[in-house]
Image (cartoon, rainbow, N blue to C red):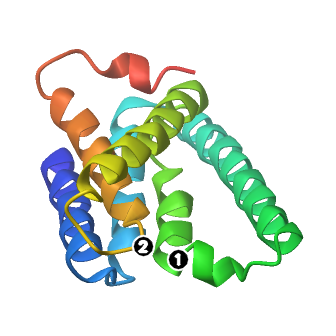
Amino acid sequence: MFKVILISLLFTVLYQDYKDRLVHWFLFPLIGVFAFAIQYLLLPLHLILLNVGTNLILVLFLLLVCYAYTKLRKIEFRNSFGLGDVLFFIFISFTFSTISFLVLFIFSLCFSLLLHLVLSQKSKEKTVPLAGYMALFFGVVYGFTFFCESNFLYAC
């Protein structure tokens, strides 16, 4: 049941981000809560906290690198990276074990780039709905877990 709700939330983020480039802020903490709950059903609490803590450190490091890059390029951070993207990065950290998260996070960024390159041919929109594209990717990953063994995604 938690997976169905989480997938619904992820697809809601996709829809809102793609349509308006605005996502209701409360969806991001809900994603984190349901992702945490799914892990809680499979792992002891201390392992979940270790996973989430490590994932958050990785995400915060990535955000700091992006921030430093925008400062070096004399670009306004908020013009290159939306608040919804930052919130999505933070709350998606609650999803999987660190190795699985890192692999899926990198692939979701690559997927987002490819999807944007394909769809931007038809659209005049210059901004990228990064949180929406990544939500699509993670929604599909969670969808696949209905059909195959998914415990390896949570293993430490």
x, y percent for residue 58: 71, 46
Task: Farthest residue to the right: give it.
Answer: 72
Label 1 – label 2 distance at C-alpha: 10 Å
Give the secondary structure at mark 1: loop
x, y percent for residue 4: 13, 50
The reply to whether discs 1 and 2 touch (Cβ–Cβ < 8 Å) is: yes
Q: Is residue 63 above or below residue 26?
A: above
x, y percent for residue 74: 82, 78
Q: Say which mark, if any, is on residue 82.
A: 1
Q: Residue at x 50, y 27 (%)?
A: 100
Q: Amino acid at mark 1?
A: Gly
Q: Which residue is mark 2?
A: 127
Q: Is residue 71 left or right of residue 58?
A: right
Q: Say which mark, if any, is on residue 22.
A: none
Q: Residue at x 27, y 34 (%)?
A: 141
Q: Residue at x 23, y 68 (%)?
A: 123
Give the secondary structure at mark 2: loop
